[in-house]
Image: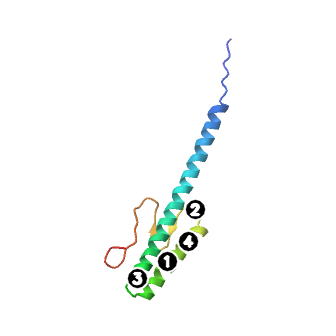
Amino acid sequence: MVGICEDVTDRERAGEAAAQLAAAEALRKRAMEINDEIIQRLVLAGVHLDRGAVDEAAGAVDEARRCRAADRRRPDGHRGTAARPVAPGSGHRLSGPDGHL
């Protein structure tokens, strides 16, 4: 009778490292998406201010704040509000009344 023993420690470590790398990349991507969404809302607020639309600018800033606060409350990876849900990778972009930032 012949027995074969294989050490899979290196393979397990490589799998764990790959999982950690994937998790870190997902967090990095999510942080970039949050930053992009907030910056777009703040740019929109600036456009409104340039046009003299103070109330609309304040609304855009409030949306940026809600976006940031909502993300902190929702560790499940979902973002957006009930009125405007946004999924990662959806290509969602904010725009002004004329369709441009």
Looking at the figure, which quarter contains the N terminus?
top right
Tag 1 secondary structure: helix
For the residues labelled 4 and 2, the Cα–Cα distance comes to: 14 Å
Residue corresponding to mark 1: 63
Q: Which residue is mark 2?
A: 76
Q: Which mark is residue 84?
A: none
Return the residue nearer the eye: 13 or 77. Answer: 13
Task: Where is residue 10? Give x, y as percent.
Answer: 65, 32
In percent of width and height, residue 70 lies at 56, 71
Label 4 sits on a secondary structure element that is helix
How packed mark 2 is, by other alpha carbons closer than 10 Å (few <14, some 14-19, many 20 or more), is few
Between the C-alphas of marks 4 and 3, the distance is 20 Å
Q: Tell me, yes or no, whether the two marked residues, 4 and 3, touch with CB atoms within 8 Å.
A: no
Q: Quadrant of the C terminus?
A: bottom left
Residue at figure coordinates x 46%, y 62% from the top left: 87
Judge whether 28 appears above or below 36 on screen. above
**Label 3 or label 1, whichever comes before in sequence order:** 3
Q: Earlier in the sequence, mark 1 or mark 2?
A: 1
Look at mark 3 in the image and give the residue it sits on: 48
Instruction: Reply above or below: 93 against 98.
Output: above
Q: Nearer the viewer, mark 3 or mark 1?
A: 3
Residue 92 in the image: state x and y as whole percent.
40, 66
Residue type pointed to by label 2: Asp
Q: Which residue is mark 4?
A: 68
| Gap in angstroms between the C-alphas marked 1 and 4 | 9 Å
Q: Amino acid at mark 4?
A: Arg
- Which structural element holds mark 3? helix
